Image: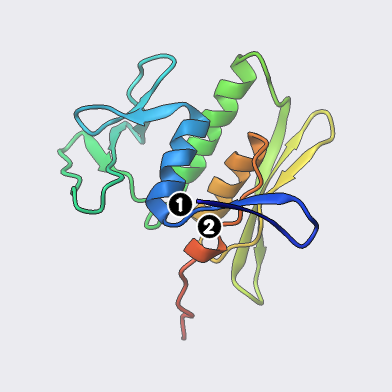
Amino acid sequence: MQIIPNQQGQLVTIYDNINEAFYNLFLEIGLFINQNGYLQDQDTGIVIRFKDKFIKASLNENVPVYTGKTDIAFEPAHNFTLMQNLMGYYIDKREAGDEPIHYGSQGIYDVKDTMEHQVFVKTTDGLVYESLLYHNTYLAFMDCVFRLGGNNVDLHNLDIWEERTK
């Protein structure tokens, strides 16, 4: 992980790899991977679900995730709605906690020319939290979660994208 100034002089966090970014995302949301490989809320003890399935994860590329019929693997690159769901979970936790963000709405801007996506959250106070533009939608959701938590990040080094022809 590196913390460097951006062009505007603000400090920005850049993660060395995707697992480091996921680890810090889990910390921001208040989640951890329990001894059975399930994503669990550190405050409530609840094992996190997505579409009625328990989320299993590994932050070690040498440790595979084995899922059963009641599980889903944490693979947001293949299922960005999983990351969208985690952002919603984070917003719900913030709203119920001591430092609510006063959630109003959220959405995705799609830039057709460049095939990039930006996630935003608007508050009832008039604040707007916007991710940077990314080709991979799940990174835009991750970026927005970090920004909601007061952290400037740049995940472009993780934004692996192959231009699709056809």
Residue 149 versus residue 63 in the image, above or below: above
Q: Is residue 12 visible?
A: yes
Tell me how far mark 2 sits from mark 1, CA to CA. Answer: 6 Å
Q: Position of residue 54 (x, y in %)?
A: 28, 32
| Dot 2 alpha-carbon crowd within 10 angstroms: few under 14, some 14 to 19, many 20 or more | many
Residue 53 versus residue 138 in the image, above or below: above
The disc at residue 80 is 1
Residue at point 55%, 57% (across, down): 155
Q: Farthest residue to the right: give it.
A: 126
Of residues 145 and 163, the one drawn nearer to the viewer in this rendering: 145
What residue would you read off at disc 2? Answer: 137
Residue 136 versus residue 166 in the image, above or below: above
Q: Position of residue 142 (x, y in %)?
A: 53, 47
Position of residue 95 in the picture relative to residue 60 (left or right): right
Residue at point 47%, 40% (across, down): 24
Q: How many marks?
A: 2
Position of residue 116 in the picture relative to residue 76 (left or right): right
Q: Are marks 2 and 1 in contact (CB under 8 Å)?
A: yes
| Dot 1 alpha-carbon crowd within 10 angstroms: few under 14, some 14 to 19, many 20 or more | some
Of residues 57 and 164, the one drawn nearer to the viewer in this rendering: 57
